[in-house]
Image: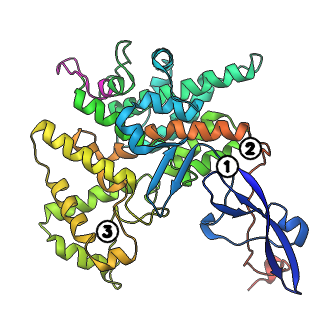
Amino acid sequence: MTVEKQKAHLILPGDKDVQLDVITDNMGNNSIDIERLRANTGYITYDPGFANTGSCLSSICYIDGEKGILRYRGYDIEDLVENCDFIEVAHLLVKGVLPNASERKNYQMLLNKHSMLHYNMQNFFRSYPQDAHPMSILASMVASLSAFYPEMEERDPEENIDLTVTRMLSKMRTIAAFIYRQANGLQFVDPRWEYMYCENFLNMMFYTPVNNYHPNPVHVDLLNKLLILHGDHEQNCSTSAVRLVGSSEANLYASVAAGVCALWGPKHGGANQAVMAMLKNIVDNDIPVDDVIEKAKRKDNPFVLSGFGHRVYKTFDPRAKIAKKMNLTMLNAEHREDKLLEVALKLEEKALTDDYFIERHLYPNIDFYTGIMFHMMGFPQQMFTVLFAMGRTPGWIAHWLEWRHDIHQKLGRPRQVYVGPMERKVVPLDQRP
């Protein structure tokens, strides 16, 4: 990243010319440095949703929404999905480099070593109603980790942080699996030493003493890929929440719990559930795809075609392309059909040839296809966002760590444009109308 000699000129009322540094990042994108704007001029910027605001300098993830590019630390998402498993990509996001064979083996062993949950935490799970939303339990359990695994300040701070990071990444899958077991009234299944990350998770989810369950290799491979697709996505809502909470110097568990809560919303991590509900309604009621497309185009109808369009991408979401192929791979491998996927493919075909969707850059996003795959793998719909959180955990950790080494380490504190009442005086209670 370099600061160019060129300046941007901001003309304020009174013809005051304010010069602002132009920052050019490593990909040639330009931004205007307004860090001292209010201090020097008294002005702030107004940017609803922070759509045009860069909140940090980051080396973790790069997105080009116009070209459909997504990279983790310089590696294209397609390259990572094709050649790595989730543990390797988690290592890349958290530690900055892809591991070699020895490092990969050691990292797997370390994650398994810290995959067990404190026995007393199991009582927490059992105290929740069986119909409690999985994300409410996930947020609570992640925050509770700090009570059972408190930071040891007397130790080397960096060693302690590394241990905390490993615990967070490893225990997230165990918490996720236990949430499913609790909802279904099943005994908890502990992780096993011989299984790797995704195998362990599937076994903890679906094994019972009477089903002789063994993780399906096809499912293991696809789950690895799905988690990689969710690994990071720049300064999205939940990641920004993690960084914002982390900027108060809150611990990792509290910061990730904030990310879980942000991910819960239907406009973020809950979007794949909306897609599944839409597809199921179309299939159950035998609604023609053409009718669905026309309904989505009508301005007087609140219906939205879930899974299309993205805040950043103005072309096909590269993750959606990969997820689509994965769905077809799974169908071919298991010699099966799926009505929901058939409808999804027809909707995509119609939308990509319709001027309404083309002009508005409404292409399928990752949520359009991942829910279908989770469904085909046997995950209940309410677990979809929990799976998203599992995949996003290394990204959240990476951003929390990055803030700790930020040269500014400023507490996140956005400004506002006040539109409330002007100064008023309190009228005594007995005189108020």
Tell me the kind of residue under disc 3. Answer: Leu
Q: Quadrant of the C terminus?
A: bottom right
User: What numbered label is drawn on residue 248?
Assistant: 2
User: What numbered label is drawn on residue 193?
Assistant: none
**Residues drawn in magenta:** 202-214
Picture layout, residue 55 above or below residue 328: below
* Observer-nearest of 130 and 366: 366
Tell me the kind of residue under disc 1. Answer: Leu
Is residue 114 at least partly visible in the picture?
no
Lateral position of residue 226 relative to residue 208, left or right = right
- Whichever of labels 3 and 2 marks the residue nearer the N terminus, that label is 2
Kind of element beneath mark 3:
loop
* Observer-nearest of 130 and 374: 374
Corner quadrant of residue 143: top right
Which residue is most to the top? 193
Which residue sits at x=74%, y=16%? 155
Is residue 199 at least partly visible in the picture?
yes
